[in-house]
Amino acid sequence: MSSLSKKLDDIKLEDIMEKVHNYIEDEEQIRIIEKAYHFAFSKHNGQFRKSGEAYIYHPMNVALILTTIYADYETISAGLLHDVLEDCDCTPEEMEEEFGPVITKLVKGVTKLSNINFSTENEYLIDYYKKIIVGMSEDVRVIIVKLADRLHNMRTLWAIPEDRQKVKAHESLDIFAPIAHHLGIHKIKSELEDLSLRYLKPDVFYDIAEKLNKTKIERDRIVYDMQTEITDLLNEHHIPHEIKGRAKCIYSIYNKLDKGKKFSDIYDLLALRILVNTEQECYLTLGLIHSKFRPLPKRFKDYIAMPKPNMYQSLHTTIFGIDGYLFEIQIRTHEMDEVAENGIAAHWSYKENKGSNKNANLTSTTEQKLQFFKSIIDLSHDKMTSEEFVNSVKDEVLNNNIYCFTPKGDVMELPRGATPLDFAYKIHTRVGETTVGAIVNNNIVPLDYELKDNDIVKINTNKNSTPSKEWLNMVKCSTTKNKIRAFFTRSERDIYIERGKYSLEKELRKRKIVFSEFLQDENIKKICDTIKVDDLDDIYLSIGNGKATVNGVINIIYKEEEKTPPKVVKVTPKNKDADIIVSGIDKVKVNLANCCNPVYGDEIVGYITRGNGITVHRIHCHNLEMLEERTVDVSWNDNTDKRYLTCILVHTIDNVNHVLDIIQTISSMNVNVDGIKMISHGDTSTYEVNCYVTGIDQLNKMSVNLLKNKFIEKIERAMR
């Protein structure tokens, strides 16, 4: 068991207070810590942990861990109280009345983190939960208490089943130890890593521990001799100092062995830490050591001039010491050492007790928090400047994100302003699509209710329910909007499929063709190959949306024999309709349909009207389905040089007026605009544009040019 913890049932309040008195002098603050202990003792009375001891020993051990990193009185009080709100009969109002808003806020923050169901299934989830922990903690001390809580739980991990031991060990190694590292709390980070390795790979852990024990006597002798050499050197130059041996944690050794190093090649098993009074003495000490002992190339690091993000400062060098042994040397001031060991937690004790010490005011509280956020969230190693990163942290973490819970305690990260619909789609698309209501904090709320931090959200669903287009105006997340839009795209597809299936079956009945005979596999394959689709549903879809005619599809398999071959007669160019050739008919009145506005190059079909000649439609015009089967083959006359009226719909991503931009783009293609109308749809707009083109090629080129405008989302031909 670690020296930081006493035997479970031996710890007493006096043990905690003895540590507290070492660095907190304010009697009122000490009184509050004692009050927190007695309050927690009364609330946890009669409760026991799985390890068998009275529950109060857990918060007492958490408080004791916090004293070793010189946490302030509010943090220690929160450590003693951290399970009271969750496990005892106590309300936040009662706690605030007893201990004030700050300590209560810290306890509520720890409770909130305790409700998270962590997952370490993949790297994405590990980074996600690190970010979640940061984003949910308005005060960095919340995480410091949580780390101490996790450390004591790891020390008593033997009390839970083996499968749960491994889960908790993975969480500690992948999520909590890196956070402790980025906070600079070396004591907690190292012990979490060692304990995690002990449960995840016990054989490896005990093998390394045994090797360390076997070489300990020899290493101690070499370290003592080296320490004597350096002490004499510094005393000779009148530099007051303190030298410590530095223990190498087992997990760190495991990492090096795992990368292929031999145990005998891990040179920093021999290590010394030299503490001096001033920054200037750090550099003097370094110079003296290098003058006597040859440094190992490329092993010098200056973290004093360039501190780490967690405010760690020290000089690192590796030298060839006595008898040729390699030694890793760290040189720092006493204040730097406290920060190195205790991390950001040390800064509260500096401010309270160090007065005018140089490091007392390294950063303001806000700057500490921002530095902390930076160090945690910068785990994906995004390449951005410090200023850009801090700004992104302010925007993305401090301002724009909220964290809500499912009734089971799963946490959902959402942008500020999100609604229960965003929450539902975050759980699963199917949950979102079948949402019929929401309950937030046990109260029924409308679906456009704006969620707040820490809301507990229950989504009510009905498997027969479907989304409403009104939801697009209720949701905040762009991903939610995309999922809703995708649903309606799928729904329209289903409608077209049903329409196509109905039309095909109707025509098959009319022709007295047996369904099963027509829908044989070889027939479906032949149709798919001909109209270039993948399966039967796509055939129905093509018929339903007008891209293929029902007769055209049937005729691929059952081509009706024509009694007489069609007679194609070109109409003389003198005729005003000379651009259209009607199969088998010499002279006839021909009109272009206003519903689909065919242009030269479109696939077309003629419809024989009653008393008004032939109306020419695009072959996939949906109006053909509602007309009787009086169609005739028609084609374009290649000699025509007419311009044809067409109508396109231009969909934009915003509701800004882009009329001038659209007209300019179209005019640059030598296309005449006949009219343009803007139709607003809330956040987006659609422009109905009538223009004259020479044919389908010019229309396609015009569409490509229009799509080069970033504000245009898509373009389609209008169908009336």
Image (spheres, grey):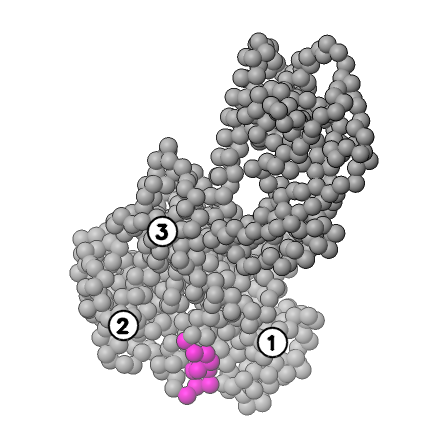
Left or right of 706? Residue 179 is left
Mark 2 residue element: helix
**Magenta part mainly helix, strand or loop?**
loop
Please state which of residues 258 and 133 is positioned toward the viewer in this rendering: 133
**Nearer the camera: disc 2 or disc 3:** 3
Residue type indicated by callout 1: Asp
Determine whether 549 is above or below 30 in the image: above
Residue type indicated by callout 3: Asp
Q: Residue 443's spot in the image, x, y percent?
A: 25, 50
Residue designated by label 1: 302
Q: Is residue 357 visible?
A: yes
**Span colored in magenta:** 356-365
Residue designated by label 3: 448
Distance in Å between CA atoms under marks 3 and 1: 54 Å
Asked where in the image residue 658 lies, by quadrant, the reply is bottom right
Determine whether 240 is above or below 95 in the image: below
- Precedes in sequence: disc 2 or disc 3: 2
Residue designated by label 2: 17
- Precedes in sequence: disc 3 or disc 1: 1
Left or right of 191? Residue 273 is right
